[in-house]
Amino acid sequence: MAIDRAGKLHLNRHKANGDPLVAVLTETVTDDHLAELRRDGISYLFAGGRELDLSLAIGRLGDEFGVKRLLLEGGGGINGSFLKAGLIDELSVLVAPVADAGEGPTLFTDGVANKLKLTGVDRLEHDFIHLRYQVS
């Protein structure tokens, strides 16, 4: 799934890592962009007029494409939007054994605070740690 509210992404291929792409758009996307998606064999769906309705998008992904489970790998903005919409039920975090003093991305933006319940901890190869949380 590629979230593309304004029709600005030029994906140029219909699959990513062997999986078909579906563009999630608003109704403001131009006919030229829709023609580009069709030319590239990329499926798309509309989920809102001017603004994206993420709940509607998830429902349509299930109804039209049979998606039952979704892995969200976004930046802080898109992650925060899904969290704010109540669409995240589990958080999986990998902690790498690296100290980075640079300014980096955050998991969530949008000022949303949710309680998390730790449901699992695994130590992985090369000293990585995998944390799993249930979002309440």
Image: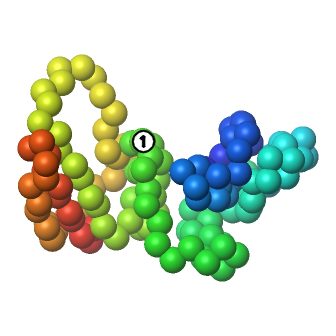
Which residue corresponds to the image point at 46% horizontal and 53% vertical from the top-left? 81
Residue 65: x and y, percent? 66, 73
Q: Which residue is mark 1?
A: 75
Residue 19 picture location, percent across and down: 59, 58
Displayed quadrant of residue 43: bottom right
Q: What residue is shown at x 28% (from left), y 61% (from top)?
A: 91
Q: Quadrant of residue 86?
A: bottom left
* Left or right: 37 in relation to 100: right
Residue at the top extreme of this rendering = 102
- Who is closer to the viewer here, 80 or 37? 37
Q: Position of residue 48 (x, y in %)?
A: 71, 60
Q: Is residue 52 visible?
A: no
Kind of residue indicated by mark 1: Gly
In the picture, which quadrant includes the N terminus?
A: bottom right
Are there few (<14), some (14-19), or many (20+) residues within 10 Å of tag 1? few
Q: Is residue 69 left or right of residue 10?
A: left
Residue placed most toward the observer, 112 or 105: 105
